[in-house]
Image: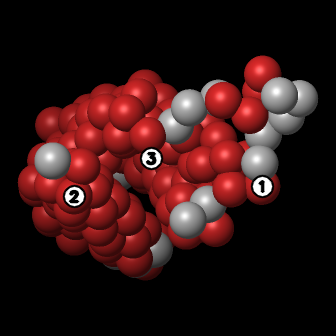
Amino acid sequence: MTFTWLVLHTFGLVLWIGGSLAVLAAASAAPRVDPAGLQGLLRGLAPIHRWLVGPGLMLTTGSGLFLALGMYRIEGAAEGGLSGSGSWVLVMILAGLAAALVGIVSVLPNAGRLGRMAVAEDDGRAARALLARLTRSTWISAALAVAAWVGGMLGR
């Protein structure tokens, strides 16, 4: 059963980080496009969040919590500290929870707002500002997710 959760956890991480990198690559073109092109860019980013980033974030977080509750034991704390492996697993858990928090609180709501935004009203200034905020929070969330992944690999 743990193997199944581990596969789901890894699949969710691939969706989450891959979708985030796709969003960051597409958002890098935003300063160079006209308002009509910006509207198309925003409409293209919405499905990436809906089908990759959001489900990947939720799948990774849910399966990670299940795995952490089943696998991570603070037995070493009673004897005076954690082992080296346990410390890396703790880094994985904390960085993963921080990445999920940033994703749930900032990335997904801003992506939803951006997908519903009309660009023609103010020549795209508000949309570009919201896209810049989304890009910053996506960088933070993806960096924390990668840090959690590295912590997990070092904790093996």
Badge 3 marks a residue whose secondary structure is helix
Determine contact: label 2, label 3, CB under 8 Å: no
Q: Does 125 sit left or right of 52 as displayed?
A: right
Q: Which mark is residue 134?
A: 3
Three-letter amino acid code at the position of disc 3? Leu
Q: Earlier in the sequence, mark 2 or mark 3?
A: 2
Residue 152, relative to residue 74: is it above or below? below
Q: Position of residue 25 (x, y in %)?
A: 39, 76
Query: Label 1 belongs to which residue?
Result: 84
| Residue found 83% across the figure and 28% down from its top | 79
Q: Does 69 sit left or right of 15 as displayed?
A: right
Three-letter amino acid code at the position of disc 2? Phe
Q: Earlier in the sequence, mark 1 or mark 3?
A: 1
Query: Label 2 belongs to which residue?
Result: 3
| Residue 14 visible, this angle | yes
- Residue occupying the far top of the picture: 78
Q: Earlier in the sequence, mark 2 or mark 1?
A: 2
Badge 2 marks a residue whose secondary structure is helix
Q: Position of residue 132 (x, y in %)?
A: 51, 52
Determine contact: label 1, label 3, CB under 8 Å: no
Q: Position of residue 77 (x, y in %)?
A: 77, 27
Q: Does 26 sit left or right of 71 as displayed?
A: left
